[in-house]
Image (tube, grey):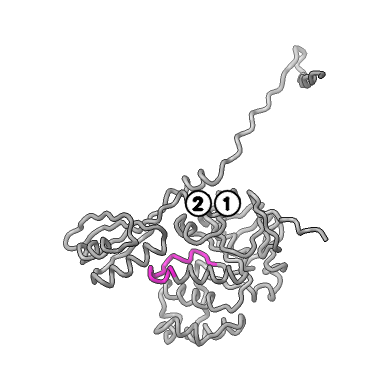
């Protein structure tokens, strides 16, 4: 009996002996809002955490819509677990998805959760307990961030997803919840699921992914192991403080996880604080502890990312432009035949 041959994994193949969970075979297509086009993408993704870096215009929204079966490809085939999700309801039942735009049905949150998990077979009581007070509210009264929180809990409550699709999962997420999300994603990957994180920044990928995909102007231009990205990204949080800035800085300075800390005072009592740590989980956890200790009031925070152009340039070397072809013209005006190839020297 011959050993199984490794299958190709997109651009820059790595050996994969297990059958791929998600396959795109020369796929071209748009998402429903027509924000971006994915063109001629071929990739195979197995169990593990895969992060696709790119904006909606680069084809990230189209990639998410195609793999979850929301739209069918214009060309090519998309397979999840060996079936086409756009055409097979059975394939869609194995997909747990958090989409960029919430799509909860109107009514109560409790009813929406029970309906969604009746399809996947998840435990609604545990999901509702994780939502806390949100479970008792009406969907129409929720903010966009609260709707995404509900949909995230529904996706994570799927008992055995073939594909866990997370589209911009760290957008609108509380910093204290980020470590739990990363932990659950890794658990699903260890259990054999394909976890695909679409969008987000380089620090998100470096702290989570096994493999990084790079989308650029509608094309999948690179597929690299995460080690290639970890060398380029140092996670850093930028925090805007309304009051209690000095107390927050003192609390952060006492955190062993914080590697770098800079701040500028913004009167009266506010501050702009930048902190760095070994990974994104450590930075978020340190910030949450410092806020609890200091009682500081935050205006907001954001993760400072390296310029995306620099990441693309580091992960993908575009092919050199082809030299222009020039035709030699004879005195009669007709193109001359190409010169004969040089003869190889005889030994």
The image shows residue 305, relative to residue 332, as above or below, that is below
* Quadrant in which residue 334 is drawn: top right
Quick check: 129 above or below 196?
below
Task: Give the magenta-colored segment's residue range.
Answer: 166-179
For mark 1, give the secondary structure. strand
Task: Say which of 85 and 345 sits in front.
Answer: 345
Q: Position of residue 63 (x, y in %)?
A: 59, 60
Q: Secondary structure at mark 2?
A: helix
Q: Is residue 105 left or right of residue 143?
A: right
Q: Quadrant of residue 3?
A: bottom right
Residue 205 rendering spot, x and y as whole percentages: 49, 58
Task: Give the alpha-carbon distance from disc 1 to disc 2, as whole Å.
Answer: 8 Å
Question: Is residue 278 shown in magenta?
Answer: no
Circle 2 residue: 229
Residue 224, numbered label: 1
Q: Find residue 335 and report its image quarter.
A: top right
Do the residues bearing badges 1 and 2 touch, measured as CB atoms within 8 Å? yes
Left or right relative to 72: residue 224: left
Q: Nearer the viewer, residue 290 or 172?
A: 290
Instruction: Name the spot of residue 188 as percent of width and height, x first.
Output: 57, 71
Q: Give the numbered dot on residue 133.
A: none
x and y, in percent, of residue 19 in the image = 71, 63
- Residue at point 64%, 29% (across, down): 323
């Amino acid at each position: 009996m011959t050993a199984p041959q490794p299958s190709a994994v997109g651009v820059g193949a790595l050996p994969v002996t297990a059958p791929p969970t998600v396959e795109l075979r020369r796929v071209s297509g748009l998402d429903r809002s027509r924000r971006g086009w994915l063109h001629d993408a071929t990739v195979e993704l197995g169990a593990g955490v895969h992060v696709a870096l790119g904006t909606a215009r680069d084809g990230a929204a189209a990639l998410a819509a195609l793999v979850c079966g929301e739209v069918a490809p214009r060309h090519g085939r998309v397979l999840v677990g060996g079936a086409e999700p756009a055409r097979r309801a059975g394939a869609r039942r194995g997909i747990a998805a958090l989409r960029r735009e919430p799509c909860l049905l109107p009514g109560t949150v409790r009813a929406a959760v029970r309906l969604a998990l009746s399809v996947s077979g998840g435990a609604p009581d545990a999901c509702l307990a994780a939502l806390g007070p949100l479970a008792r509210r009406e969907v129409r009264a929720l903010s966009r961030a609260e709707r995404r929180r509900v949909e995230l809990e529904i996706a994570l409550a799927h008992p055995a997803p073939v594909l866990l699709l997370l589209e911009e999962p760290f957008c609108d997420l509380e910093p204290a919840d980020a470590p739990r999300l990363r932990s659950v994603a890794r658990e699903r990957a260890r259990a054999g699921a394909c976890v695909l994180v679409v969008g987000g920044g380089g620090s998100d990928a470096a702290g989570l992914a096994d493999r990084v995909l790079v989308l650029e102007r509608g094309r999948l231009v690179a597929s690299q192991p995460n080690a290639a990205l970890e060398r380029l990204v140092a996670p850093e949080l930028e925090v805007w403080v309304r009051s209690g800035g000095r107390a927050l800085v003192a609390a952060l300075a006492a955190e062993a996880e914080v590697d770098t800390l800079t701040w500028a005072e913004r009167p009266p009592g506010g501050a702009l604080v930048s902190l760095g740590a070994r990974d994104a989980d450590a930075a978020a956890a340190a910030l949450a502890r410092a806020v609890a200790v200091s009682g500081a009031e935050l205006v907001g925070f954001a993760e400072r990312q390296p310029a995306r152009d620099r990441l693309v340039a580091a992960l993908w070397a575009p092919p050199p432009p082809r030299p222009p072809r020039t035709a030699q013209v004879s005195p009669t005006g007709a193109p001359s035949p190409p010169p004969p190839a040089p003869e190889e020297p005889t030994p």
